[in-house]
Image (cartoon, rainbow, N blue to C red):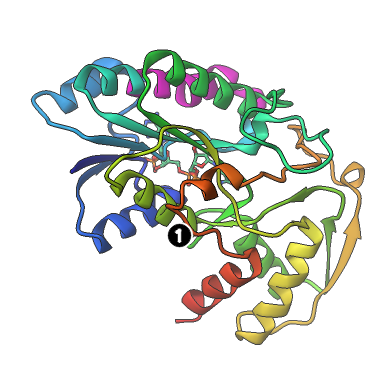
């Protein structure tokens, strides 16, 4: 099996690369030096190359900045997947695309299923949804995985931000009216590699996030509790619950990001760890 990992320097890309190496899967990797918005340079890069899978972890993920940079967000999040899926189809390869809970408006009561009607609230969500649509128009052998509240061992993510603030401040405020499932990047990376390594892959749109649900406030409290236990937080910090109306951000966020994992669980190819257990593995790794 030969894999092209796109976006290997990103938070998820690094976790996927680690899995590819651990499983001794043949792969090559790139980042923005092979610009996925430029189909000619992608064609040149892949000239003469045999390919079984493309895993696309590249995206423009700065959700608030996307509101001001709509054209750029569209190019990376929609046109990029369009180009990759056209090329995958030409080469007879399959494609894994990572998408987001932000394709939904968050007004549903309960978990979102794969066939619930998307209604993105933000430019980021709209451009990611357009990317999904291009892929499903261009090819059949694709796996789109929507995930949410992703954190890992690199980049700017909620857990790193909390650990930093909790070590610096006596009090922080965290939103307590948005619900979701924290997702540890190495868990998602393992799921991706399991899905592409099986003899008969199952294609389509899937949801994957940590098991169990919480608000950002609950998540922050657990980070604080475990951070203190693991010696990653030495400061005493009070965590105050606030409503999202007190914490305005440029791009609106869905109130409800809970994703149903029934469909991906039915494939029997992945494990879906409880979010607080995954957080513990994150802490252990950070402590090393
Ligand atoms: N982060 C979250 O909370 C979250 C939640 C739900 C879904 N997702 C989705 O999960 C996926 C991974 O997210 P992440 O947080 O790991 O991303 P990330 O850390 O922001 O990494 C983005 C990657 O994309 C590459 N890239 C950006 N523009 C490119 C271009 N034009 N051509 C080629 N590569 C380009 C970057 O390369 P350089 O390093 O060279 O710039 C980097 O490797 C994305 O699809 C994202 O939409 C993320």
237 relative to 160 in the view: left or right = right
Residue 211 visible to an observer of this rendering: yes
Q: Quadrant of residue 257?
A: top right
188, above or below 252, in the image: below
Q: Quadrant of residue 61?
A: top right
Report crowding for label 1: few under 14, some 14 to 19, many 20 or more residues within 10 A (C-alpha).
many
207 relative to 64 in the view: left or right = left
Estimate the x, y position of residue 119 in percent, counting from the top left: 72, 23
103, above or below 286, in the image: above
Name the residue tied to disc 1. 186
SS for callout 1: helix
Residue nearest the viewer, comparing 259 with 234? 259
In the rendered view of the protein, which quadrant contains the N terminus?
A: top left
Residue at left offset 60%, top offset 69% = 279
Estimate the x, y position of residue 138 in percent, counting from the top left: 38, 14
Residue 168 visible to an observer of this rendering: no
Residue at left offset 45%, top offset 19% = 136
Range covered by the magenta-colored residues: 67-84
Residue at left offset 61%, top offset 86% = 231
In the rendered view of the protein, which quadrant contains the C terminus?
A: bottom left
Q: Report the residue that reaches farthest toward the left.
A: 48
Mainly helix, strand or loop, the magenta region?
Answer: helix
252 relative to 63 in the view: left or right = right
Residue at left offset 74%, top offset 57% = 213
Q: Quadrant of residue 95?
A: top left
52 relative to 60 in the view: left or right = left
Estimate the x, y position of residue 211 in percent, counting from the top left: 64, 58
Residue nearest the viewer, comparing 37 with 180? 180
86, above or below 217, in the image: above
Q: Is residue 160 magenta?
A: no
């Amino acid at each position: 099996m030969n894999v092209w990992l796109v976006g290997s320097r990103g938070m998820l890309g690094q976790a996927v690369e680690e899995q590819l190496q651990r499983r001794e899967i043949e792969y090559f990797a790139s980042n923005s030096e092979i610009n996925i918005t430029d189909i000619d340079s992608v064609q040149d890069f892949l000239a003469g190359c045999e390919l079984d899978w493309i895993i696309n972890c590249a995206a423009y993920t700065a959700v608030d900045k996307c509101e001001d940079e709509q054209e750029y967000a569209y190019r990376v999040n929609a046109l990029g997947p369009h180009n990759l899926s056209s090329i995958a189809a030409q080469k007879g390869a399959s494609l894994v695309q990572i998408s987001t809970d932000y394709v939904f408006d968050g007004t549903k009561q309960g978990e979102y299923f794969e066939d619930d009607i998307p209604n993105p609230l933000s430019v980021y969500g709209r451009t990611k949804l357009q990317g999904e649509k291009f892929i499903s128009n261009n090819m059949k052998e694709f796996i789109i995985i929507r995930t949410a509240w992703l954190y890992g061992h690199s980049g700017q993510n909620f857990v790193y931000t909390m650990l930093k603030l909790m070590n610096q401040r006596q009090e922080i405020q965290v939103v307590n009216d948005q619900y979701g499932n924290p997702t540890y990047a190495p868990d998602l990376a393992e799921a991706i590699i399991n899905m592409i390594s099986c003899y008969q892959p199952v294609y389509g749109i899937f949801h994957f996030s940590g098991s169990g649900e919480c608000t950002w406030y609950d998540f922050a409290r657990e980070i604080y509790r475990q951070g203190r236990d693991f010696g990653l937080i030495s400061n005493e910090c009070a965590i105050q619950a606030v409503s999202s109306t007190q914490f305005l951000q440029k791009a609106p966020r869905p109130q409800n990001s809970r994703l149903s994992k029934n469909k991906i669980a039915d494939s029997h190819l992945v494990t879906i760890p409880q979010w607080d257990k995954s957080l513990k593995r994150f802490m252990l790794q950070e402590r090393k």
